[in-house]
Image (tube, rainbow, N blue to C red):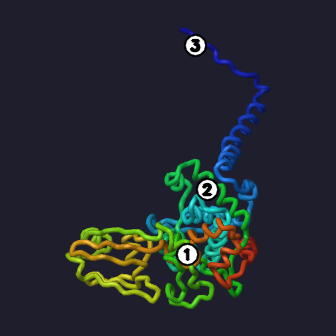
Amino acid sequence: MPQPTPHHPPRANGPLQFAVRVTLAFIAMILLPIGIAKLFQRSPMPNIGAWIQSPDATIDIRVYDPSLNQVSTLPLNSYILEVVSAECSPDAPLASLEAAAVATRTYAERAIANPAALARKHGAELTDDPALDLPVATEDELESAIGTSRALAFITRIQTAIEMTGGRILTFNQQPILAFMCAISTGRTRTGLAALGQDIPYLQAVACPDDEASPSDTATNTFSIAALNQALGTHITTTASLQVQRGADGFVTAVRIGDKTLSGQTFANLLQLPSSDFVWHLTPQSVTITTYGRGNDLGMSLHEASLLAAKGWTWQAILAHFYPGAKLSQTAIGSSLLSGSNR
């Protein structure tokens, strides 16, 4: 049976059809998602051109992934977006996202100038290991965690925060500060002296009453002897050998388990505890650990920052609160690296 002859439109309409298709594709991929995001969160609309052409976008930063033993290169604004995605709540007010964007940019600029040993060893400036640097979350990870539409709205708001604070960093003595952040503190942030053994003027104990009152400030986990041995690489048969040492601020500085001694932070990391501020209850065959706070408790508490922003605090005021003595400055990345070979 003969097949019907396909109908072809006149060739003269080809350019017009192509233009229509391009326009529809642009609307579908760019304008429509942004419009949907605007329905979910009211904030200034990010400028796509500005995002692509911003000074942050012209700087590459190399991030080492220890779990995969590989280095990824991405624009600085994309790195900031991934850190803020990982660190902040999707419901956080814009001012707290802006504060987090400035802190992340500051952290990255300091790392570009002086990479830590592990990152430098692998030809990178930073790692994505939250025990060593700031955590990151890709768009796919964010969508899996909170859903596509909510992730899209969140990303749009983070882009706005990055653009609206473009080029701003925190400095002390004309150098980028160690702009640490934590998800939620134990009710007060730690001093640099207590956490790092260094008296750092802008890392002081800052009261966080909203953190202390939050139910998410505490978490409890129980581990069997087998689970402890597997996570810690030990061979104990009872918890009787477990001993703990604490610093003046209550954080665990060392854990003795069998013939092995671990730092409090290493112990917390291996057991995937949210913090190294913890207490435990021992039975012969298990340990129940209650932790306080999430993160290293240094610098800015993002939970407290979010609630301060909800009370009307600006991002500038939030940063001044958590990093006393640090100054807002213009990034030196553009002048020092754009004239070089970063891109």
Q: Is residue 76 visible?
A: no
Disc 3 crowd rating (10 Å Cα; few below 14, some 14-19, many 20+) is few
Secondary structure, mark 1, is: helix
Query: Residue 245 at what x, y percent from top left?
Result: 37, 87
**Residue located at (25% from left, 69% from top):** 226
Q: Nearer the viewer, mark 2 or mark 1?
A: 1
**Residue located at (60% from left, 80% from top):** 178
Residue 263, image quadrant: bottom left
Q: Which residue does the numbered mark 2 point to in the structure image? A: 154
Question: What separation in Å lies between label 2 and label 1 (alpha carbons)?
Answer: 26 Å
Q: Nearer the viewer, residue 213 or 250?
A: 213
**Amino acid type indicated by mark 2:** Phe
**Amino acid type indicated by mark 3:** Gln
Q: Which residue does the numbered mark 3 point to in the structure image? A: 3
Query: Residue 44 at what x, y percent from top left?
Result: 73, 56
The first of marks 2 and 3 along the sequence is 3
Residue 68, image quadrant: bottom left
- Identify whether 144 is placed above or below 319: above
**Amino acid type indicated by mark 1:** Pro
The first of marks 1 and 3 along the sequence is 3
Q: Is residue 308 visible?
A: yes
Residue 95, image quadrant: bottom right
- Identify whether 165 is placed above or below 201: above
Q: Residue furthest top?
A: 1
Secondary structure, mark 3, is: loop
**Residue located at (20% from left, 75% from top):** 237
Question: What separation in Å lies between label 2 and label 3 (alpha carbons)?
Answer: 51 Å
Horizontal side of residue 172 vs 268, given as left or right: right
Q: Which residue does the numbered mark 1 point to in the structure image? A: 209
